[in-house]
Amino acid sequence: MTDKITMSADKALKRLKEGNKRYMETGLSNGDVSPAIRLKTSGHGQEPFAVVVTCSDARVLPETIFSTGIGELFVIRVAGNVIDDHQLGSIEYAASHLGVKLIVIMGHTNCGAIGAAYHPDDDNKYIRFILHEIRSAIGNETDPEKACILNVKHSIEAVEESLEIQKEEHEHSLKVVGAVYHIDTGEVDFL
Ligand SMILES: [Zn+2]
C-alpha cells in the first residue's frame, strides 16, 4: 500500500456523481485534456481517484460521463464488465500502488454482452469465457436491466473475494460500489 495521501472513497464517489450531473447538464466533455495537464501528469505521474471497471461498448465513455480528464480515472474495460485474474491484478495495482480508494463496477443498459449470454451460438469461441461468467451471474433472469444489475453485483463479489482487496477494505477504507450507466440519458445510477 502506498503512503500517498489520496482521496477518500466517499469523496471520490461524490466527485463522480457531481461529474455525471455536470455532463448531463452540459452535454459536453468537461474533463481537462489540455497540453498543460498532459505535461504535468507526464512529469509527476497519475493520481486517479477511482477505478472504473466497465464494458467495452463504444457508447460508454467513462472519462466523459464523469467529467474527468487526464490522470483522474483508472479505467478497466472488458465486454460485459466481467472480472477475471487480469482485472483483479489491475485493481490491486491501482489500490496498492496508486492509493485509489474507490472501485466502481459499472454495467450499462442495452449491453450486447448480456444479450449474447441468452444465446448459445458462440459457445465454441473465445467469447464463451465472457458469456459463461455472465450466465453464472444472471441465472434465469430474463429482464435485461435486472440481469445487468445481477452481473454488476457478481463482479463486485468477485472483487471482494480477492484477498488483497479485502485487506485494503479493512485497513485503508477502500470501497467497491456498483453502478448502471443509461446509454440513452447519460445518467449513472449508483446501486
Ligand atoms: Zn456492454
Image (tube, rainbow, N blue to C red):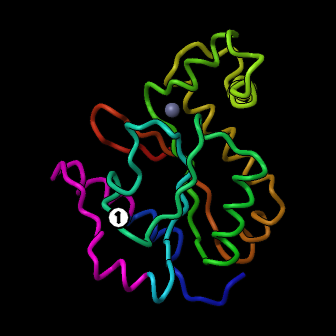
- Is disc 1 placed on a helix, strand or loop? loop
The residue under the point 71% across, 23% down is 135
The residue under the point 55% across, 29% down is 148
Q: Which residue is mark 1?
A: 68
Residue reaching furthest left? Answer: 26
In the rendered structure, the answer to whether residue 79 lies left or right of residue 125 reads left
Asked if disc 1 is less than 8 Å from ligand 1, the answer is no
Q: Does the magenta portion include 96?
A: no
Q: Does the magenta portion include 23?
A: yes
Give how far across and how far down residue 67 sits, in percent: 30, 60
Is residue 18 depicted above or below 7 in this figure?
Answer: above
The residue under the point 53% across, 40% down is 55
In the rendered structure, the answer to whether residue 119 lies left or right of residue 60 reads right
Residue reaching furthest right? Answer: 163
Is residue 106 depicted above or below 21 in this figure?
Answer: above
Q: What is the chief secondary structure element of the magenta stretch?
A: helix
> Which amino acid, mark 1?
Thr
Badge 1: residue crowd in 10 Å (few <14, some 14–19, many ≥20): many
Give how far across and how far down residue 13 sits, in percent: 45, 62
In the rendered structure, the answer to whether residue 55 lies left or right of residue 137 reads left
- Magenta highlight range: 16-41
The residue under the point 50% across, 44% down is 191
